[in-house]
Image (spheres, grey):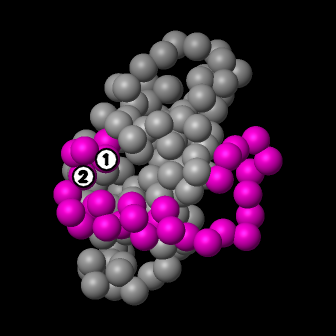
Amino acid sequence: MVFTEERLSRAQAMRLNPKQWAYVGDAVYDLFVRTHVLTTTDYPLSKMHKLSIGHVGCKPQAAALERIEPQLTPEEADIVRRGRKLRTHTSHPNADQGDYARATALEALIGYLYLTGQDARTEEIMGIILEG
């Protein structure tokens, strides 16, 4: 999935704030989920939407992170650690802080991988998440 030819080097991406990785990762994650639902079901859009929502909340994203963590490289684990430690001034009313932190960490990882052009790895990780 390529949106732009302009990607960042790892050094450039590391200079970004993990919130910025998560900002991009949220959109990339959502697009992967919607594309997966669209291409693997033949449901009406309203049912596809409900199925997609089941993947993008704090709890399902926190659970997804737990599934992939044992398979992360040391670099990816560091990105997750930095994403999890973010001090956010926002919270989701229906999510516990731990789930919110893990979901943000997952989004940070997906954003970092996307921004650095690691599309094959992004697809591999999203494949594990969506199969689970």
Give the camera-side residue of 32 and 39.
Answer: 32
Task: Determine the residue positioned at 56% across, 56% down.
Answer: 101
Report x, y in % for residue 7: 33, 74
Q: How far apart, in angstroms, are the residues tagged by discs 2 and 1? A: 5 Å
Task: Determine the residue positioned at 32% across, 42% down.
Answer: 68
Local secondary structure at mark 2: loop
Number of numbered callouts drawn: 2
In which quarter of the view is residue 11 placed? bottom left
- Mark 1 Cα shell of 10 Å, populated few (<14), some (14-19), many (≥20): some
Task: Determine the residue positioned at 58% across, 47% down.
Answer: 99
**Tag 2: residue type?**
Leu
Give the camera-side residue of 130 and 103.
Answer: 103
Report x, y in % for residue 131: 35, 26
Task: Determine the residue positioned at 73% across, 57% down.
Answer: 91
Q: Residues in magenta?
A: 68-97
Left or right of 26? Residue 109 is left
**Residue identified by numbered label 2:** 72
**Tag 1: residue type?**
Glu
Can you say whether 18 is above or below 35 in the image?
Answer: below
**Are discs 2 and 1 less than 8 Å apart at CB?**
yes
Left or right of 127? Residue 44 is right
Report x, y in % for residue 53: 63, 32
Residue 83 belongs to the span the image colors magenta: yes
Q: Quadrant of the C terminus?
A: top left
Can you say whether 120 is above or below 127 in the image?
Answer: below
**Residue identified by numbered label 1:** 69
